[in-house]
Image (spheres, rainbow, N blue to C red):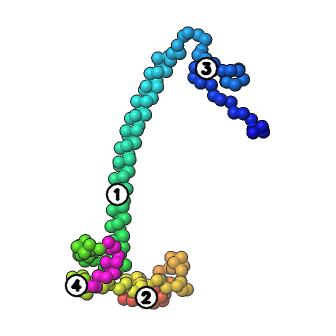
Amino acid sequence: MSDETPTPKAPAAGDAPATAQASAPAATPPATAEAQTVPYERFAAKVAEVAELKTIAASVGELQGQFQALQTEVAKERSAWGEKETLYKARIFDPDVGEVVRFQFERSGSENFADFVSKADQDPVLKKLLSNAKPLATTPPENVGARNSPPPRGEFSPESVQNMSVDEIKANYAKFTGAWGIPASRFK
């Protein structure tokens, strides 16, 4: 025990400190007897600031309510799109058939819409409805209704025809109409 340093005992509330080193100096009030005062302008500014912060806090509460409402709306829209996407993947494009599938899903009490749609052939109503559904029309062949491109320039360019005399045009008329694919009888 000789190697240990003794721990000082804390003085009791009514006891005076034994030595000046043992206790820290006590905080003393200011020497002046005047009480601290806050200028009225500063006090009024702080009261106004607190009132402003209260209105901001109230508007934050309103904004949080609006945010929650928007979050629920987005969740509903995503759910609706997920159902629509599931119907499209199942090749159900008719909106009326989609409504019947949704109605049957709600009646079934199933949890997952995609699983229900994948097993739609087991439901007697949907099986009959989906067997009568029209398949999606095939895509039309390319270039249907497209016009043929003009023929490549032959020996006559538009500039050379514009610079021809009337006699030269009459002499080459059959060549023009043949190159352009126009019957000669249409132009006279």
* Residue that numbered label 4 is attached to: 124
Q: Residue 23 in the image: state x and y as whole percent.
A: 67, 24
Can the viewer see residue 106? yes
Between residue 130 and residue 179, name the one nearer to us.
Answer: 130
Whole-number angstrom distance, CA of label 3 to CA of label 2:
125 Å
SS for tag 4?
helix
Magenta highlight on residue 7? no
For label 3, count other residues whose C-alpha is less than 10 Å away and answer few (under 14), some (14-19) or many (20+). few
Viewer-nearest of labels 3 and 1?
Answer: 3
Relative vertical location of residue 176 with respect to residue 39 in this rendering, above or below: below
What's the magenta region? 111-122
Residue 113 vs residue 168: left or right?
left
- The amino acid type, in three-letter code, at marker 4 is Pro
Relative vertical location of residue 69 with respect to residue 177 in this rendering, above or below: above
Between residue 123 and residue 148, name the one nearer to us.
Answer: 123
Whole-number angstrom distance, CA of label 2 to CA of label 4:
61 Å
Instruction: Point out the image quarter for the N terminus.
Output: top right
Image quadrant in which you'd find residue 28: top right
Identify which residue is drawn at 70% across, 25% down: 22
Identify which residue is drawn at 40% across, 34% down: 54
* Residue that numbered label 1 is attached to: 72
Can the viewer see residue 187? no
Viewer-nearest of labels 3 and 4?
Answer: 3
For label 1, count other residues whose C-alpha is less than 10 Å away and answer few (under 14), some (14-19) or many (20+). few
Q: Residue 168 in the image: state x and y as whole percent.
A: 50, 84
Image quadrant in which you'd find residue 70: bottom left
Whole-number angstrom distance, CA of label 3 to CA of label 4:
95 Å
How many numbered discs?
4
